[in-house]
Amino acid sequence: MGMDAIARLRSSFIAGLFVVLPLTVTLFVLDWAVDRLTVTLAPVVSGTGLAEVAGNQALATGLAIVLVAVVITLVGFVASHEAGRRLFGGFERGVRLLPVVRAVYFGVRQVSESLATPGDGFDRVVVAEFPRDGTWSIGFVTNPAPRSVRRAAGEDLMTVFFPHSPNPTAGKLVMIHPDDYAEIDMSVSRGLRLLVTTGLSADDPNRLPAAVSSGE
């Protein structure tokens, strides 16, 4: 087999790899999401009797997803109007009266808003040896550590959020010195995409490697 044929086979393999990899990652994430949704929506399916109506557990779960999506859309529609804003504003004022509940509610809300608009929430992307030496993890700097923590530690600390993969809404919040992490040239959205795709996303999804584009 000549060198030209080998080069063409290599280019074809690389081109196929960059077609198959996104599909594989998408299927992996969807499979994980379906598994989690099936467990989460089990009470909805049983409580609404969708399994009996649909006659099939998978179809019942699908109907439950549609039902939940409709409810979320209706909540968003109501919240976008003045009456809805007053209603949810009153609800949040009530939540503020409950110490433990308000910490969880507003904490989750802030993380959700940060993920929806990463540039407004997370400051920058860093890497650090976490959770142990020799293991490097991607993290997002959020804010300086609380003043009481900095006083107790006797040094300037920053709060860094190390998300889990492929679910970046969960993770560990660590307070570390800036010398213990390194900033990297990566946008917050790129860092989140890297986590969601379990590290399989290309550096630039809009560009193929030179070997593919040039056909070398």
Image (tube, grey):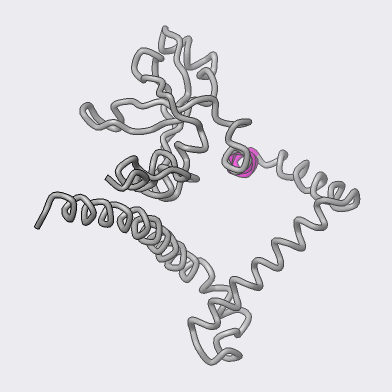
Q: Nearer the viewer, residue 205 or 106?
A: 205
Quadrant location of the N terminus in the rendered image: bottom left
Figure quadrant of the C terminus: top left
Q: Residue at x 34, y 17 (%)?
A: 180
Identify the residue at the far left of this view: 1
| Front one among 141 and 212 | 212
**72 sits to left or right of 200:** right
Q: Is residue 18 above or below residue 187?
A: below
The residue sitting at the right extreme is: 83
Residue 20 on image: x %, y %: 34, 60
Horizontal relation, residue 169 to residue 211: left or right: right
Snapshot quadrant of residue 8: bottom left
Q: Among all residues in the image, which is located at the extreme top?
A: 154
**Residue in the image at 24% along x and 32% along y:** 135
- The verdict on residue 100 being magenta is yes
Q: Quadrant of residue 178?
A: top left
Q: Is residue 188 magenta?
A: no
Mostly what secondary structure, the magenta segment? helix
- On the image, the x and y values in percent for residue 207 come to 43, 43
Q: Is residue 100 above or below residue 81?
A: above
Name the residue nearer the viewer: 48 or 161: 161
Residue segment shown in magenta: 99-109
Position in image of residue 12 (x %, y %): 28, 56
Q: Residue at x 48, y 17 (%)?
A: 149
Residue found 20% across the figure and 50% down from its top:
7
